[in-house]
Amino acid sequence: MDWIEPLSKRDFENKSVLELGCGNGSLLFHLANWKPSQVLGMDLGAGVHTARNNLANFPIVRIVQGDLVTHVSNGYDVVICIGVLHHLKVPKEGLDSVIRNTAPGGRFHCWVYGREGNGVVRLLVEPLRGVCRYLPWRITDLIAIAAVMPFYMYAKLLTWFKHVTQLQALPLYQYAMWIGKEPFKFFRHMAFDQLIAHRTIYISQSTLVDWLASYAVIDKSTVYIIQRNGNSWKFGGQIKSG
């Protein structure tokens, strides 16, 4: 749940929750156990059918297929958008929707790939993505397996020698510490997820600062921008009441 922190269970209890870009509903599966009053998950892709199956035992959860950028509602107490904005053609339009659909006094929380700390990824992954967009998913999966194997070995080595402080200066060190405890199938999933995306825009901290400053409705004293694993950003805040 470190994607959600600094929000915690108490921020969701008895609250209406909206997830923009819910995918297969895996995150909502956890949040639904935090006793929100109602939950809406939205995604443009066919993953909504899987999400409905995954969340069938939660009557408070509703899954709809739609465009998060154009979505308009009466407002939710908590709006989250995890790993989505950086795949949009215009990420700021997605954030506009997050803010627009957060009720007065409500909280919003997002997570995006950072420009900082991802130099190696941008250098190696982006050319592969340009090729994989034209290939069948099964071929892309094979490419993902081959491409991620060296990083899998790199991350495992770093976790085995984490007591060597000199290694902390190496690329993607913090990310390797996080993912290094996972099995290979998790690495494979992360690589495949990267390669099938039509686009990825790596967002800098300064860009997030400018975006958040541009909304008059945000209570600026509640704004936070937190680096995660050295290569991504969690950010959010609260909408002014009234």
Image (tube, helix red, strand yellow):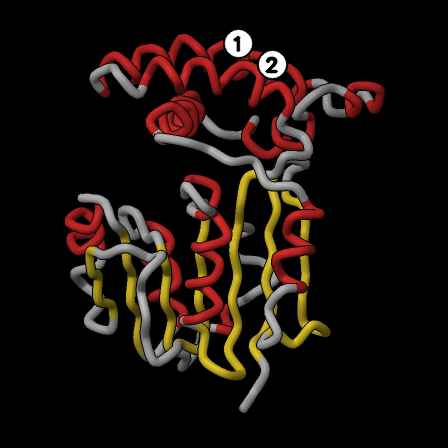
Residue at the disc numbered 1: 150
Is 94 positioned to the left or the right of 224 in the image? left
Q: Position of residue 9 (x, y in %)?
A: 50, 69
The answer to which quarter of the image holds residue 58 is: bottom left
Q: Position of residue 197 (x, y in %)?
A: 36, 31
Q: Find the distance from the CA under tag 2 to the CA under tag 1.
A: 6 Å
Q: Amino acid at mark 1?
A: Pro
Is 136 positioned to the left or the right of 30 in the image? left
**Which type of secondary structure does the marked residue at label 2 adopt?**
helix
Q: Position of residue 90 (x, y in %)?
A: 45, 46
Q: Amino acid at mark 2?
A: Tyr
The answer to which quarter of the image holds residue 147 is: top left
Q: Quick one: label 2, few (<14), some, or many (20+) residues within 10 Å?
A: some
Identified at 30% across, 11% down, the residue is 142
Is 61 positioned to the left or the right of 108 in the image? left
Contact between labelled residues 1 and 2, with CB atoms less than 8 Å apart: yes
Name the one closer to the observer, 63 or 200: 200
**Would you place residue 141 above or below residue 31 in this image?**
above
**Residue 154, label in figure:** 2
Identified at 61% across, 61% down, the residue is 6
